[in-house]
Image: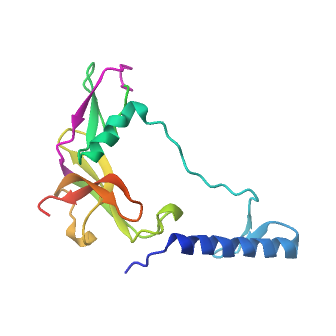
Amino acid sequence: MSTRVTKEQIEAFVKSWLSYVESEKERTGLPIISDEKSGDPLFVDQRELRLRYLIPVKRISQFFEGLKRSEVLYTECRTCNVKYFPPQSDCSRCGSGSIEWKKVEGEGTLLTYTKISVKPTSFMHHDDYIVGIARMKEGFNVLAWVRAGDVSELKVGMPVKLEVERRQHDNYLTYVLVPAGS
């Protein structure tokens, strides 16, 4: 049974934790706290680091346009025929910039999967989720979330499809693996 943690709860936890660090710093004169599990001393860096990446995607913008059309696209080098997923604008094998955009037909075989219940902070607002790797008919592997009611529905070697969906809570289009026939 998963318990969803909201972004507000995460912020409240961080605020409470930082308050604890400040009280320890006031008490001891040092930004050092004890690890809850081992009791070992931990230095708490006093600089806050929050990241939100801005990644230029102009040369692979066709990939995102494909998602808007419910299509997942990959690239293939016209010079040496290497296929890339996620797509690349240049071939890392031969260095060519001559690439062709193609649609992933969407069928593959599930190679492995796991249920994520201990999540990174940026995903704590999601229920537990399943990620998997599938070998697509085009010959490359895809790492993606798996849409399944329960992990017991999945088996290594089973056929899967690649579909586009809007990820709830984050409200953006992405691709997911889905057991074939569901």
Which residue is pictured at 71% across the width and 70% down the height? 18
Which residue is pictured at 74% across the width and 59% down the height? 45
Work out which residue is located at the far right of the displayed protein and give it. Answer: 29
Query: In the rendered structure, which segment of residues is drawn in magenta?
Result: 91-109
The image quarter in which residue 62 lies: top left
Pick the front one: 80 or 19: 19
**In the rendering, at what x and y percent does residue 40 appear?**
71, 70
Pick the front one: 122 or 136: 122
Left or right relative to 59: residue 110: left
**In the rendering, at what x and y percent does residue 157 appear?**
18, 56
- Residue 141 in sight in this render: no
**In the rendering, at what x and y percent does residue 101 appear?**
26, 31
Against 63, is 23 above or below? below
Which residue is pictured at 53% across the width and 43% down the height? 54
The image quarter in which residue 166 lies: bottom left
Q: Is residue 105 magenta?
A: yes
Quarter of the picture containing the C terminus is bottom left
Against 103, is 132 above or below? below
Left or right relative to 47: residue 159: left
Work out which residue is located at the far bottom of the displayed protein and give it. Answer: 1
Number of residue marks: 0
Pick the front one: 117 or 72: 72
Against 32, is 1 above or below? below
Q: How is the image coloured?
A: rainbow
- Residue 58 in sight in this render: yes
**In the rendering, at what x and y percent does residue 150 appear?**
26, 72
Against 152, is 132 above or below? above
Quarter of the picture containing the N terminus is bottom left
Q: Is residue 18 magenta?
A: no
